[in-house]
Amino acid sequence: LQTKLPAVGTTIFTVMSALATETGAVNLGQGFPDFNCDPKLVNDVSQAMQQGLNQYPPMPGVPALREAISRKIEALHGHHYRAADEITVTAGATQAIITAILAIVRAGDEVIVLEPCYDSYVPNIELAGGVVVRVPLTPGTFRPDFDRIAAAITPRTRAILINSPHNPSATVWSQQDMLRLQELLAPTDIFLISDEVYEHMVFDGQTHQSAARFPGLAARAFIVSSFGKTYHVTGWKVGYVAAPAALTAEFRKVHQFNVFTVNTPVQHALAQYMADPKPYLELPAFYQHKRDLFRAGLARTRFKLLPSEGSYFQCVDISEVSDLGEADFAQWLTREIGVAAIPLSAFYGDGFDQRVVRFCFAKKDETLIAALERLAKL
Ligand code: PMP
Ligand code: GLN
C-alpha cells in the first residue's frame, strides 16, 4: 500500500498511556487531568440534554457559545471578533488546526513549524499537500529565533504555526516576541496559525500574549483554543477558532465537510458556564500551585529542572540521572520507577535527542506526591 503518511505511527501519547496502564505506573505522560471537572458543568450538559437540545446546532456553532467566546476574547485581549462570522466552534483544537491548514495550504505551499512542535502539525501539513519547513526553537531555552525564522521565509511560504504557552517546553512568548513576529510578517501575506490551547495557564504574574492583541497578527491569524484544557474536559473535544471574516469563510468551507458541526448539549453548557469568568481567571493559580509542588519535589532529585512558565508541563534534563537516550529513558522510568513521561524527541521530525523528558502536572496533588515518592530514588 502506498500510504499518504509513511512516517506516521501511533502517537507517543497513546503509546506511553498504554504502557503506564500495563505497568501500573503513575501516568505523567499524556497531557490530561486525573481529576473531574466542575460538577456544575456536568449538570449544565445534562440539563441541556433534558431540555431536548440534542439535534444539529448551526454549522459554525451554537450562537450563545460564539457570543460568550467573543466577549471573553474582547475582555482579555481588547479585540472584537464578531460571533456571526469570525468565530467557529470546533471538535477540539486538533480539528481546528487541521481545518485551518486544509483551508489555506495548497499543494506545494511551504508552512513553517517551530520545533519541537505538537505532533499533529506536520502530518496535517502533509495531508494538505504542503511542504513542511522546520525551524528549531533556540536549543536549551526553546525561545523563538527570529533570525532563523526570517531565513526560512520564501515567496512560497503560506503560513507559520506558533504555540504559546508551548507544548512541550512550557515556555511562554513575551510581548516582545509577538511584536518581533508582527514586524517580520508585516511585509508578507503569510497566514498565522496561533495554537493558544494553554492560554489560561500562564504563571508568575505573566500575561498570555494572544495574537488577538496585535492588530498586524490578528488580521492574518487563525487563533485556536480548547475547552478541554481550560475546563478539565479533554475528552469532550470542543474548541474554537477566531479569525477575520475572510479567513473564517474559508475555514468554514472545510469545516462544514470535515465535521459539519459539534456536540450540541456540550456547546449549550459551555455557553452558560462561560458567563462566569472565575474558572478561567483562577486557573493560573490553580496550576501554579501544582507546578510549585511538583518542582519542589523534583528539586530533590538529580533531574535538572527547566523553567515552566505556562501550560501544564514540566520538562527535566535527565543527563545526571541516566546514560540512556530520552526515549529509552521514558520507557525505563515507566517500567522500573513507575512514572510515565514523554521524551521530547517525539516532538521533532528527526527524533532529536537532547536528554529531556516532559511530565504533565495536571494531576491531583496526591498523584503528584505519589509520583515524587517514586522519583525520589533518582
Ligand atoms: N495543541 C496543543 C499544543 C496541544 O497540547 C493539544 C492537546 N494535546 C492540542 C492542540 C489538541 O487539543 P484538543 O484536545 O482540544 O484537540
Ligand atoms: N495534547 C496532549 C499532550 O501533549 C495529548 C493529546 C493526545 O493524546 N493526542 O500530552
Image (cartoon, grey):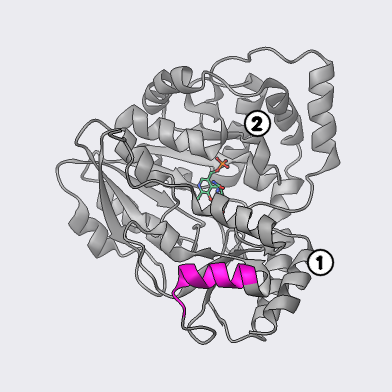
Q: Which residue is mark 2?
A: 68
Q: Earlier in the sequence, mark 2 or mark 1?
A: 2
| Depth check, front residue: 122 or 241 | 122
Q: Position of residue 110 (x, y in %)?
A: 23, 42
Q: Residues within 10 Å of mark 1 (few under 14, many from 20)?
A: few
Q: Which mark is residue 366?
A: 1
Q: Please tell me whether mark 2 sits on a helix, a strand or a loop.
A: helix
Q: Position of residue 225 (x, y in %)?
A: 55, 41
Magenta part of the protein: which range?
Answer: 324-335
| Quadrant of the frame with the N terminus | top left
In the rendered view, would you say 296 is above or below 275? below
Q: Is residue 350 left or right of residue 358?
A: left
In the rendered view, would you say 251 is above or below 364? above
Residue 308 visible in the displayed image:
no
Q: Position of residue 83 (x, y in %)?
A: 55, 24
Instruction: Name the residue: 46% across, 78% down.
Output: 324
Q: Is residue 6 left or right of residue 188?
A: right
| Depth check, front residue: 113 or 319 | 319
| Amino acid type for the residue under numbered disc 1 | Glu
**Which is the main secondary structure of the residues drawn in magenta?**
helix
- In which quadrant of the rendered view does residue 376 lie? bottom right
